[in-house]
Image: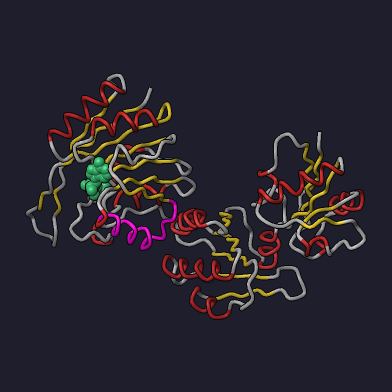
Amino acid sequence: MPRVVLVGVGPGNPELLTLRGKEAIERARVIMGREDLLSLFPHKVGIPLRGDENTMRVLIGQALEDFAEVTVLLSGDPMLFSLAKHLPASWSLEIVPGVSSFQYFLARLGIPWDHCAIVNCHATQELSRFVFALEQGDGVVVFAGRRLQALRILEIIGALREDAEVFAGKDLSLPGEWIGRGTPESLRKTLPEEDGLFLLFVPPGKRRGIRFLEDHELARGTVPLTKKETRMLLLGILELAPEMTVLEVGAGAGGMTVEMARRIPGGKVVAVEKDPKALGYLRENLRRFFVTNVEIHEGVAPFAIPERSYERVFIGGSGGNLREILKKSYALLEVGGRIVCSAVTLKTLEEATATLGTLCGGDVGVLSQSITRFVGGSQQGQSLNTVFIVWGRKP
Ligand SMILES: C[S@@+](CC[C@H](N)C(=O)[O-])C[C@H]1O[C@@H](n2cnc3c(N)ncnc32)[C@H](O)[C@@H]1O
């Protein structure tokens, strides 16, 4: 069986390589890795690794045809945001842990990381994990692969935790090490000009849950919007977990899209919407609330529903196709998953209960919500349309 030794070489300074890592490198017939890491061991035969994970996997595979065992050097620790999870299960792996640059960074700052979220913002979707942690008041360590990404992260911190004292680091443990601190705004001005890996740390803030958005905060023009009180109920019934994939049919201006996406930072909302005007507002609302984990599909459901499996389905609009939409989304729903549907007409209510009743074997819940808002301290309330919520579970 091909054997690969993954050695975590730490944040860059050879003094932070473990003794076991050093031994593994000395033992190796050939070492592979980024050129800057190979240059730390000029007496060894080195094969450079470059490109994305797939390219690296192919390069290691090619080396394994010539050598029974290959030692791969990885920066930091091999099990954190690294190559290990992209390698085939058929290879036998030995993993030599290393000091991650975030551990080094927090040691330099003298800050414990027991309760910190650790987020990798190389990929756009990961921004949602960052926003989630920030909004809840968690301490967050962020890896930003590029200067531009670091600037974007500071912009988001500025919007969500304006007064936070933020720390940033670059070239950590190396002779040119830079560590800065300040407000998000001041750090944006003092960040080094050269590109590279930046680490940022935002200390814990006030503990909060993910809040519900006020209706007036969402851009919508004349596009219908699910009201805050209804969103609160729907989100309770949906029972979302952070890594879920949710199908949303009839996303409209995105009231529910944004609320759901904010609660599933490691998952995704797949939103189907037919109206270009609504889609414009939906995109604006995603930008407004820094939501990056939504995939938009423009078109008419059920035809525009992407064929993949979902853990939850929310139907907020159906345009006369409810029965077909329910059937198709039920077929794509995972066993144990939930379909939730909001209805404002008796026809939709009747069709949703009947179709879901048949599909879910009678296991259907129905709820009607009447909202009365008392504004300006007046005794007289303003009532909104009654909304019906119908839901079923796939047995
Ligand atoms: C009441 S709005 C949705 C409100 C939204 N859930 C929110 O939270 O703000 C209904 C939306 O469903 C869309 N819609 C209706 N039938 C559709 C279909 N068959 N396919 C895609 N979108 C549809 C409409 O264009 C409309 O924007």
Quadrant (top left/top right/bottom left/bottom right) for the C terminus: top left
Asked whether 279 falls inside the magenta stretch, the response is: yes
What residue appears at the point 17 percent right and 33 percent down from the top-left corner?
349
Relative to 385, residue 128 above or below: below
Total numbered badges shown on the rendered structure: 0
Towards the viewer: 165 or 53: 53
Quadrant (top left/top right/bottom left/bottom right) for the N terminus: top right
Relative to 16, residue 383 above or below: above
Where residue 390 appears, as percent x and y from the top left, is 24, 33
Q: Is residue 58 left or right of residue 343?
A: right
Where residue 13 appears, as percent x and y from the top left, is 79, 65
Asked whether 353 falls inside the magenta stretch, the response is: no
Asked if residue 292 shows in the view, the reply is yes
Relative to 309, residue 361 above or below: above
**Which of the 4 quarters of the picture holds residue 69?**
top right
Where residue 18 appears, as percent x and y from the top left, is 83, 55
Relative to 147, residue 136 above or below: above
Asked if residue 226 shows in the view, the reply is no
Where residue 253 appears, as percent x and y from the top left, is 27, 54
Q: Is residue 76 left or right of residue 65?
A: left
Report the span colored magenta: 278-293
Q: Is residue 268 left or right of residue 378?
A: right
Towards the viewer: 67 or 190: 67
